[in-house]
Amino acid sequence: MVSTGATLEANGLREVEVIYRSKACLIQRDGEMAQSKQQLIDKLLTRIQGVIQARESKYIMMHAPSERLEEVIALLPGAERPTILPLAGEQQRVAMHMVSSETLFWETMEKLKALGASSILVLPIEKMME
């Protein structure tokens, strides 16, 4: 049984044939439920939503020119504003970290570079919670 294939790949194996595809579904009955059970369900749903949201997002790090920050930020739709950190020994550039949607990337990276961004890293996110 394979979920993402990462374990297969890590062990030098490969998928031979798909014999079955499945999906999980959570169903809850109408009406009141014991508070402890409802808390457990809420916790599970939060975790599932975190994995789904992480799958659709990337963690982005880069160096960006201080005077073009708003232009750079406008290219990267995210849930929150980015984290901006000073670069040691530099006044004109900062380090920028943020979570952004997966839907962008090669064209956006080229635009970021044209704005003066450098050391652009795009990393997968395993889990996240807002």
Image (cartoon, helix red, strand yellow):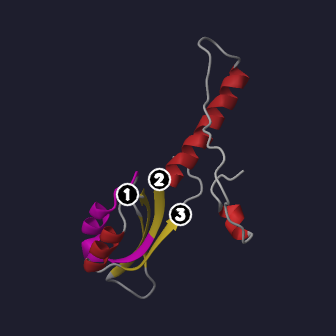
10 Å neighbourhood of mark 2: few (<14), some, or many (≥20)? few
Which residue appears farthest toward the bottom when viewing the image? 89
Let me know if residue 67 is in the magenta part. Answer: yes
**What's the residue type where badge 2 is placed?**
Glu
From the viewer's side, name the closer residue of 13 and 33. Answer: 13
Residue 103's tag is 1
| Callout 2 secondary element | loop
Q: Which residue is mark 3?
A: 124
Q: Are marks 1 and 2 in contact (CB under 8 Å)?
A: yes
Q: Which residue is mark 2?
A: 56
Camera sees residue 109: yes
- Gap between marks 3 and 2, in whole Å? 9 Å
Residue range (magenta): 61-79
* Among numbered discs 1 and 3, the one appearing first in the sequence: 1
- Place of residue 122 in the rendered image (x, y in percent of width and height, measured from the top left): 46, 70
- Place of residue 52 in the rendered image (x, y in percent of width and height, measured from the top left): 53, 47
**What's the residue type where badge 3 is placed?**
Pro
